[in-house]
């Protein structure tokens, strides 16, 4: 079955760039109908959507992070990646990647994330 | 602050029924999805497209929607349902997704 796995440095210095990769196994990242998300969760707090990418390369980012975020996809390697620049301690969190899908029921759209990685902890500290 | 508002905490007696709500303007046009998260684990999708359940999710979980409010109902709550629950949908202003602040469910 399809699985997602996050990877990357667990410690990043302030002002540097956080870089994470999500590897998709057991299926193709190019499968139609899906988009690929990054979500984060500071310790003891709620989930925050960071952004998403379609395999076409189209992206959408959380407006609050847009100036610092880049999400990219490498379909040949079945991976997608997150870069978050100019990090501060406030960016310390568990970072998750997730597969998303959307559709229409009657006349309403739905969006959901049906498959998640286990998450990776990133600490921003000098 | 989130565009989707949830009560921070809800409790239910074992075997009883509980509803967790999510409010937001975007829910007048888009369905909410619901996620269960237990400590130290990744979230799990439990309801999408108003009232569809992924494979493996017990049928005691159901969803509904009215006006600007989406609800997740657990009929006959079990001890293993104690968890944080998050709603998720599209925001009201563009092509962005947003999560509610989460509701901590305690099963007494």
Image (spheres, coloured by chain):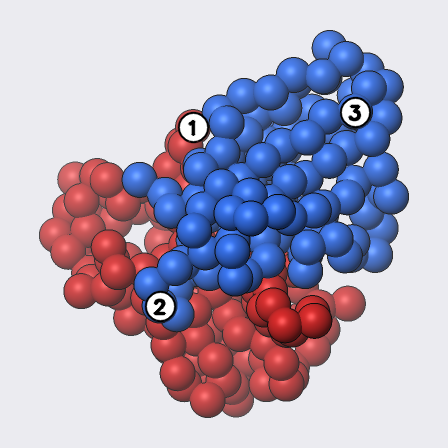
* Residue A25 image position (x, y, % from top left): 65, 71
Residue B95 falls left or right of residue B20: left
Q: Secondary structure at mark 1?
A: loop
Residue A112 falls left or right of residue B89: right
- Chain designation of label 3: B
Residue at numbered disc 3:
B17
The residue sitting at 62% across, 32% down in the picture is: B20
Badge 1: residue crowd in 10 Å (few <14, some 14–19, many ≥20): few
Q: Earlier in the sequence, mark 2 or mark 3?
A: 3
The residue sitting at 68% across, 39% down in the picture is: B72
* Residue A67 image position (x, y, % from top left): 18, 64
Q: Report how far apart the C-alphas of labels 2 and 3 lie in the structure.
A: 35 Å
Residue at numbered disc 1:
A44
Q: Quadrant of the C terminus of chain B?
A: top right
Give chain A's shade: red
Using the image as rendered, state which of residue A49 and residue A27 is in the foreground.
A49
The residue sitting at 59% across, 76% down in the picture is: A34
Residue B62 seen: yes
Residue B94 — which label?
A: 2
Q: Are marks 1 and 3 in contact (CB under 8 Å)?
A: no
- Chain designation of label 2: B
The residue sitting at 25% across, 49% down in the picture is: A12
Give chain B's shade: blue
Please check whether the numbered discs 2 and 3 fall on a single chain.
yes
Nearer the observer: mark 1 or 2; the answer is 2
Q: Report how far apart the C-alphas of labels 1 and 2 lie in the structure.
A: 28 Å
Q: Secondary structure at mark 2?
A: loop
* Residue B82 image position (x, y, % from top left): 69, 24
Which residue is most to the front?
A: B67
- Chain designation of label 1: A
Q: Quadrant of the N terminus of chain B?
A: top left
């Amino acid at each position: 079955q399809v699985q997602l796995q996050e990877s990357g440095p667990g410690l990043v210095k302030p002002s540097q760039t956080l870089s994470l990769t999500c590897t998709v196994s057991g299926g193709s990242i190019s499968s139609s109908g899906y988009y690929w998300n990054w979500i984060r969760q500071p310790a003891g707090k709620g989930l925050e959507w960071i952004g998403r990418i379609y395999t076409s390369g189209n992206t959408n980012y959380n407006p609050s992070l847009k100036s610092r975020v880049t999400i990219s996809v490498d379909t040949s390697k079945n991976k997608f990646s997150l870069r978050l620049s100019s990090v501060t301690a406030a960016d310390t969190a568990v970072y998750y990647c997730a597969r998303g899908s959307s559709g229409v029921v009657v006349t309403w759209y739905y969006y959901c994330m049906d498959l998640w990685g286990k998450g990776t902890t990133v600490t921003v500290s000098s | 602050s989130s565009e989707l508002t949830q009560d921070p905490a809800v409790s239910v007696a074992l075997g009883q029924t509980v509803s967790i709500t999510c409010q937001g303007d975007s829910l007048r046009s888009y369905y909410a999805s619901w996620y269960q998260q237990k400590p130290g684990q990744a979230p799990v999708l439990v309801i999408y497209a108003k009232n569809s359940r992924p494979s493996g999710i017990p049928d005691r979980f159901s969803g509904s929607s009215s006006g600007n409010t989406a609800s997740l109902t657990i009929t006959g709550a079990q001890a293993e349902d104690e968890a944080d629950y998050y709603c998720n949908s599209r925001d009201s202003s563009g092509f962005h997704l947003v999560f509610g602040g989460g509701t901590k469910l305690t099963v007494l």
